[in-house]
Image (tube, grey):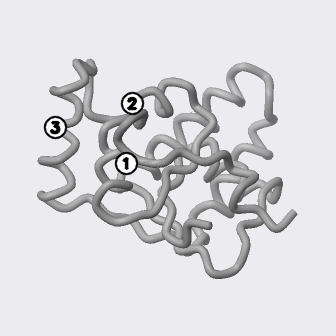
Amino acid sequence: MPKRVVIDPDTAILIASGALLPSEGYAILAPTLLRSQVLATLYARVRDGALSAEQGLAINAHFAKLKFRYLGDAVMRRRAWAIADRQGLRSTELAEYVALAQLQADALVTEDPDLAAAAEGEVPVVAPRTIATN
């Protein structure tokens, strides 16, 4: 069972909303861009009618209080660039998650098919329920 995991925006939102409670002993890591991506994802869900504005803002407020370790140093950014270049990705966003998982974690937690595809052959990928107690 991996102990240091990198999470994606959807997993962060599951945790912040209370739908996913990570088991004790997991160190949760994320690239620094996670904060902006969570905000953008919540805003999009409100605009799409999946959440009310109050729900979106409440989840974002709870997310801001969570104790995740955010990383984004020069080594990770160079690795993300190399991954994106090697895979022919249009941006480095997905590659940042993969790079961080390569450098600091045991696995990448996601159910996003694009992120899972970018991680294929690079790092182990596990579903959010893998780290859950609930």
Classify mark 1: residues with Cα within 10 Å, few (<14), some (14-19) or many (20+).
some
| Residue at the spot of label 2 | 118
Q: Which residue does the image show at 64% across and 53% down from the upper left? A: 60
Q: CA distance from mark 3 to mark 1?
A: 15 Å
* Numbered-mark total: 3
**Label 2 vs label 1, nearer the camera:** 2
Q: Which residue does the image show at 48% across and 41% down from the upper left? A: 37
Outermost residue, right side: 134
Relative to 29, 26 lies left or right: right
| Image quadrant containing the C terminus | bottom right
Q: Amino acid at mark 2?
A: Ala
Res. 33 mark: 1
Relative to 18, 123 lies left or right: left
Q: Position of residue 2 (x, y in %)?
A: 56, 66
Q: CA distance from mark 2 to mark 3?
A: 13 Å
Mark 2–mark 1 CB contact (< 8 Å): no
Q: Which image quarter: residue 120?
A: top left
Res. 81 mark: 3
In the displayed structure, 58 sits above or below 121; it is: below
In the displayed structure, 65 sits above or below 80; it is: below
Asked whether the viewer can see residue 58, the reply is no
- 2 or 3: tag closer to the N-terminus: 3
| Image quadrant containing the N terminus | bottom right
Q: Which residue does the image show at 26% across and 26% down from the upper left? A: 91
Element marked by disc 1: loop
Q: Position of residue 8 (x, y in %)?
A: 53, 46
Q: CA distance from mark 2 to mark 1?
A: 17 Å
Classify mark 2: residues with Cα within 10 Å, few (<14), some (14-19) or many (20+).
some
Mark 2–mark 3 CB contact (< 8 Å): no
Q: Position of residue 72 (x, y in %)?
A: 26, 58
- Residue nearest the viewer, comparing 2 with 8: 2
